[in-house]
Image (cartoon, rainbow, N blue to C red):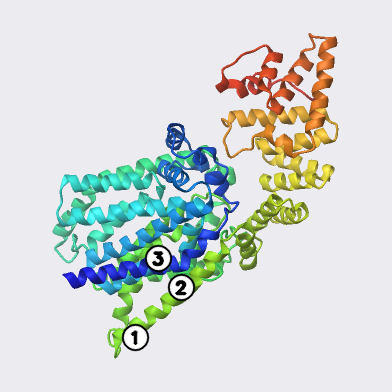
Amino acid sequence: MKRSSRFDLIVCLVLALASILVYGAVFSHQFVNIDDPVYVAHNPHVQAGLTPQSIKWAFTTTRAEFWHPLTWLSYMLDTQLFGIQPAGYLFTNLLLHIFNTIVVYLIFIRMTGTPWQSALVAALFGLHPLHVESVAWVAERKDVLSALFWMLTTYAYISYAERPGWQKYLAVCLGLILGLMAKPMLVTLPFVLLLLDYWPLGRFDPAQSPSVSLSSALRLIREKIPLFILAAVFSLIAFGVQKAGGGTDPSDQYPLADRIANAVWSYADYIFKTIWPRNLAVFYPFPDHLPVLQVAGAACLLAILTALAFKWARRYPFVIVGWLWYLGTLVPVIGLIKIGDFALADRYMYIPLIGLSIIIAWGLPEILAGLPRKRAVLATAALATLAGLMLATHGQVRIWTNSLTLFGHALRVTEKNYYAHYGLGQAWAGQSQWGKAASHFLKAVEFKPTKATLRNDLGRVLARQGKFDEAALQLTKAIEIRPQLPSAHFYLANVRVTQNQFERAVYHFTEALKLQADAQAPASQPDYHELIAAHDTADKINRAVNHYRTLLAANPHDLGALRTLAILYAVKGDYDRAFAALKVDPSPQSRMRAITRGYADWTLVKSR
């Protein structure tokens, strides 16, 4: 017993040290401009740390189209402990990943009693390059945090399966709830627990008589009804939040046939990336067209592997468990309900990879059973494989150093990647390299001409270059594609001011403020009157204010001038004068709405 405990301790230490070795470079990384600003870098609630207001916000917000209060709270705790530097948040990501890796080992050693196979599953989990995205990306905290509760819930379930009791079952339910509050990916966990009942827990034996087997299966399903109910409730919450945020808007969905084809190919592609993890990227564009033969080949491969898994279910139960683990845990993110323009994502393999690892870890000894010196061969192959994975993971971690390295690599390993160009455009714009930014935004628009946000940022940087006519064209097109994009109205208003078209400028400023107010001023949108200082518009707006004040001095009853003056004050952020002009005194909570909603129906210009 002491030797076993010492062995377990050594394995856990080796797994931790190996993870630190390959991921150590993350502590010098910067925030990247994909989701990091939304989650941390430009999020005042997270940057405030753990305060009563921020905690309340964590439980009530649906920012980033997720309801995951535990994820927000974990960021706030990091801020409290480490400040707002990337290293602190990445330290916690890595710590959670190491803990998850260790618990994977402890789960499988407890269930199977086979240390080497359990160690291999944990090593593949901890060191595979597909998991870099979940660890080296600050915004993917929800992956490693939800996986923590996945592992703890599974460990609690093993204890319950060994000796059932309501207290232990309650612990399982609590773990599932906490995990779902970090990321809804845990909706598939009850299904996985049923798989573990078959192997390795042995709570279901299909070799028994049909009546006994059916009775046993129904008992295990009934036992998990509360877990399935929890998963269903959180699934509805997740779907509702995504729908409210526009993530599942039917107008943004690809045709069903294309989504099915991409899902089939993605299932096969994830297997290829597991076996040969090269050319990994932060964004894989959804294909314009997948060749029929490619999809058919992937479908045949999946069908053959599924048939073999069921054929070997009794003789090699780990195969069917691992295979169904892989297929089942990918269902929520395989893309049948499309969210975003990407075809697949490395981060989605954080949990499903365990299923394929089970097949590898227990399958290889069976395949090589008759080989002389089998143990030496297996040990050599495992060490060589893990060494290769460590090198690949270390290289992949370096790619996440900053936005330029991240999206530059994506351009090199993918084709027609509009999002990589967009990311590089944002990165160069952040360094005031307007020419470089514009070239990448132009390329992004070329690949995705119907994406309003691309034209919006292209217009913004063209305006920075003094190309106001071109900027106005792009921003107008962005508004035509997406009329409710506040920033496009704001940037176009700035361009109109520069062109001395004050009435049109006021119209678009009004629209920007109205849309920001309708969205309850989400922090992901710019604070427009503060952004005035970043453009060559402040002086002209001040001159416009003086102009309308002169008009009102001559004619105090000019309602049009009065309203325009109020809007201009609001654009500048001078709400006191805006309300004085309007002769209203709304509560602070309704200030923005009082100005924008009350007068949004007023036509400031005859045409747009």
Q: Nearer the observer, disc 1 or disc 3?
A: 3
Which dot marks residue 389? 2
Q: Earlier in the sequence, mark 1 or mark 3?
A: 3
Which quadrant does the C terminus fall into?
top right
Residue 557: x and y, percent?
79, 8
What amino acid type should be assigned to the residue bearing mark 2?
Leu
- Circle 3 sits in a helix, a strand or a loop, which is it? helix
* Residue most extreme to the bottom: 372
> Residue 31: x percent and y percent?
57, 53
User: Relative to the observer, which residue lies in front, 99 or 590?
Assistant: 99
Is any atom of residue 297 visible in this view? no
Mark 1 highlights which residue? 377
Q: Is residue 113 left or right of residue 398?
A: left
- Where is residue 239 drawn, in percent x and y? 45, 42
> For this rendering, which residue is in front, 392 or 374?
392
Q: Residue at x 18, y 51 (%)?
A: 219
Callout 3 amino acid: Gly
For numbered disc 2, what is the local secondary structure?
helix
Q: In the drawing, what numbered circle is on residue 126?
A: 3
Marks 1 & 2, CB-CB < 8 Å contact: no
Measuring 70% from the left and 36% from the top, which residue is drawn there? 531
Q: Amino acid at mark 1?
A: Val
Rendering coords of residue 493 (x, y %): 76, 34
In this view, the residue in front, 86 or 307, is 86
Compute the Cα span from label 1 to label 2.
18 Å
Category of crowding for the residue at label 1, using alpha-carbon neighbours closer than 10 angstroms: few (below 14), some (14–19), many (at least 20): some
| Within-10-Å neighbours for mark 2: few <14, some 14–19, many 20+ | many
